[in-house]
Amino acid sequence: MAGKVFFSVSMSLDGFIAPEEREDDPDQQRWTAQWMELQQWIFPLRFFRENLKLGEGGEEGRDNDIARETYERTGASVMGKRMFELGEKAWPPEAPFHTPVFVVTHEKRDSWERPGGTVFHFVNDGIESALDQARAAAGDRDVRIAGGGTAILEYVNAGLVDEFTLALAPVLFGSGTSLFAGVDAGRVALEQVRAEPTQRVTHLTYGVHKR
């Protein structure tokens, strides 16, 4: 159990990790455009293109190094049901994890194996059980809480996260999924570990401790 439990997300300057879903945007075109703007720093990267089999080439540099380091430290991932359902429609057949992924859900479902080493396991007995299984699968590597925001917040409030990194993007949403709305601030203390500005975003890393 040597690895850390961490999450790594892109966040707008006003604190949102996803745009607001709106009734006047039934096809999610506005939502998608805003989400693409938030994630724009990662799309040109060489590692991103390699991992999704988009072809050769791409940008190198510190952003690319951080994306690759995040992938390489991850031995298993945990995610919520909603993130899985959205990704199930959007991910290519060779999903980009290439490790075991444990989906927190209330449903019973057989494991789902994808090409390239990604296997989704469905856990219906709570977030701690999912994390225990992910730790066992990860070995001495780290466990990533992949999202979405609700799942991340549950793990933070339960005191189960050791570290997190934000890619703070120069984007304003005004509303959306707030990463820390509902955080148990009386129980969570942060320690700044690293701040690395690049041309597109600022990467902020914090250690998480019990207050």
Image (tube, helix red, strand yellow):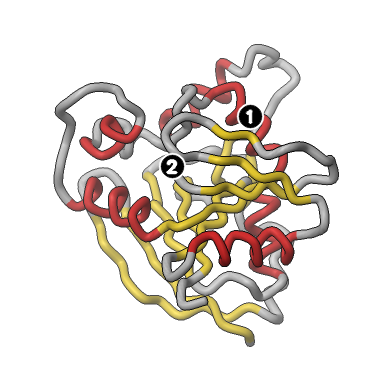
The residue at the point 69 percent across, 81 percent down is 187
| Residue at the top extreme of this rendering | 27
| Marks 1/2: CA–CA distance | 18 Å
Q: Name the residue under label 1.
A: 86
Q: What residue type is labelled 2?
A: His
Measuring from the top left, give residue 190's x and y in whole percent.
Answer: 51, 78
Measuring from the top left, give residue 150's x and y in whole percent.
Answer: 70, 51
| Count of picture labels | 2
Measuring from the top left, give residue 58's x and y in whole percent.
Answer: 18, 31
The residue at the point 21 percent across, 36 percent down is 46
Identify the mark at residue 98; answer none if there is no mark.
2
Q: Is residue 123 left or right of residue 172?
A: right
Figure check: 184 above or below 77: below
Q: Quadrant of the C terminus?
A: bottom right
| Residue at the bottom extreme of this rendering | 211
The residue at the point 26 percent across, 39 percent down is 47
Quarter of the figure with residue 23: top right
Using the image as rendered, state which of residue 27 and residue 117 is in the foreground: 117
Q: Which amino acid does label 1 sit on?
A: Leu
Using the image as rendered, state which of residue 87 and residue 175 is in the foreground: 87
Badge 1 crowding class, 10 Å Cα cut-off, few under 14, some 14 to 19, many 20 or more, is few
Disc 2 is placed on an element classified as: loop
Identify the mark at residue 179; answer none if there is no mark.
none
Measuring from the top left, give residue 11's x and y in whole percent.
Answer: 48, 48
Disc 1 is placed on an element classified as: helix
Figure check: 17 above or below 184: above
Badge 2 crowding class, 10 Å Cα cut-off, few under 14, some 14 to 19, many 20 or more, is some
Figure check: 45 above or below 132: above
Quarter of the figure with residue 19: top right
